[in-house]
Image (cartoon, rainbow, N blue to C red):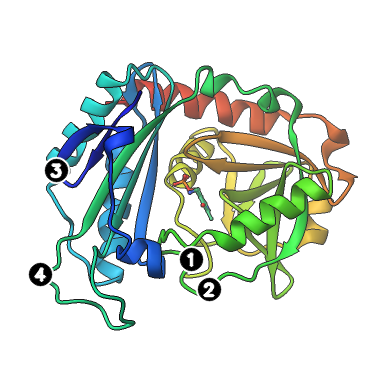
Amino acid sequence: MRTVYVNGEFVPEAEAKVSVFDRGFLFADGVYEVTSVLGGKLIDFEGHAVRLERSLRELGMAMPMSRDDLLAIHRRLVAENGIEDGLVYLQVTRGAADRDFAYPDPSTPLTVVLFTQAKPGLADAPKARTGMSVVSIPDRRWGRRDIKTVQLLYPSMGKMEAKARGADDAWMVEDGHVTEGTSNNAYIVKGDTLVTRHLGEEILHGITRAAVLKVAAEQGLTVEERPFTLEEALAADEAFVTSASTFVMPVVEIDGASIGGGQVGPVARRLREAYLEESRKAAV
Ligand code: PMP
């Protein structure tokens, strides 16, 4: 049985409890982070901690502990649960209070939960070799997608629609342009140019995105941060997505049409290798 962290305590998962009045449960009033673990070490912990602080600030919540304490909790869970490859999931909500749309008194303790998921061979996913398929769906999420909130119902629906249509995932489209994948940032490659949507309130500011754009520049690619259309994606040489748990994942089919001949292309392959190498070196 896993050990999980709940509000200051490390407990067996079966004994972990959160109130039915928790605002995360009642209002999706909470934020989260997912940090991957490779070789027992955390990938880009700092980036996730910085984004957590930003998400909390945007919602008027305080960081519940120091970055060092947060790192110590991550490390203890990884060690106690014997995680070699996997994830640490972290969630902070505005805490438990009598149900009311207005926020409770700021002295209400935030709820802090962390747990691990073992994913043996996380960096060796078969889809990284064959590429995955996506379908396009309208982006019907709320307008502050730069805040990493736990209101993930629409992305869940998108994933289910993708499955029902025989695909692996969905790319969301708004005003004729791709915003991002249901749980990842989206990219296309044409020649030596990499295109991905610019940062703003319309997408999550991916931690993997920032690292991969740096690697892309090091590899001499021209990076264009701007919106792109589905038509442009369909005419691209390559496509891929990035996220903390999939790293760089090639996309070889969009709405049933092959991209790059349906094969994983050299740019996505090189970016994945270089990203993984650099991330493992910098892991804590
Ligand atoms: N966009 C969305 C909507 C996501 O849910 C995620 C993953 N949580 C990402 C992008 C990728 O972000 P990261 O690289 O920080 O995992």
Does residue 181 show up?
Answer: no
User: Dots 2 and 4: beta carbons under 8 Å?
Assistant: no
Q: What is the secondary structure assignment of the residue under circle 4? A: loop
**Front tag of 2 and 4:** 4
Q: For the residue carrying disc 1, how many other residues have a C-alpha within 10 Å: few (<14), some (14-19), or many (20+)?
A: some
Q: Which mark is residue 107?
A: 4
Name the residue carrying label 1.
Answer: 145
Q: For the residue carrying disc 4, how many other residues have a C-alpha within 10 Å: few (<14), some (14-19), or many (20+)?
A: few
Q: What residue appears at the point 57 percent right and 31 percent down from the top-left corner?
A: 271
Counting from the top left corner in percent of width and height, residue 79 is at 26, 19
* Quadrant location, the N terminus: top left
Q: Nearer the viewer, residue 101 or 279?
A: 101
User: Dots 2 and 1: beta carbons under 8 Å?
Assistant: yes
Name the residue carrying label 3.
Answer: 8
Q: Mark 2 vs mark 4: which is more N-terminal?
A: 4
Q: Mark 4 vs mark 3: which is more N-terminal?
A: 3
Counting from the top left corner in percent of width and height, residue 38 is at 41, 21
The response on whether ligand 1 sits within 8 Å of label 2 is no
Q: Mark 4 vs mark 1: which is more N-terminal?
A: 4
Q: Mark 2 vs mark 3: which is more N-terminal?
A: 3
Name the residue carrying label 2.
Answer: 142
- Indicate the amino acid at tag 4: Ser
Q: What is the secondary structure assignment of the residue under circle 1? A: loop
Q: CA distance from mark 2 to mark 3?
A: 32 Å
In the image, is residue 160 above or below residue 228?
above
Q: What residue appears at the point 53 percent right and 62 percent down from the top-left corner?
A: 198
- Indicate the amino acid at tag 1: Arg
User: Dots 1 and 3: beta carbons under 8 Å?
Assistant: no
Q: Is residue 79 left or right of residue 222?
A: left
The quadrant holding residue 19 is bottom left
Q: For the residue carrying disc 3, how many other residues have a C-alpha within 10 Å: few (<14), some (14-19), or many (20+)?
A: few
- Indicate the amino acid at tag 2: Trp
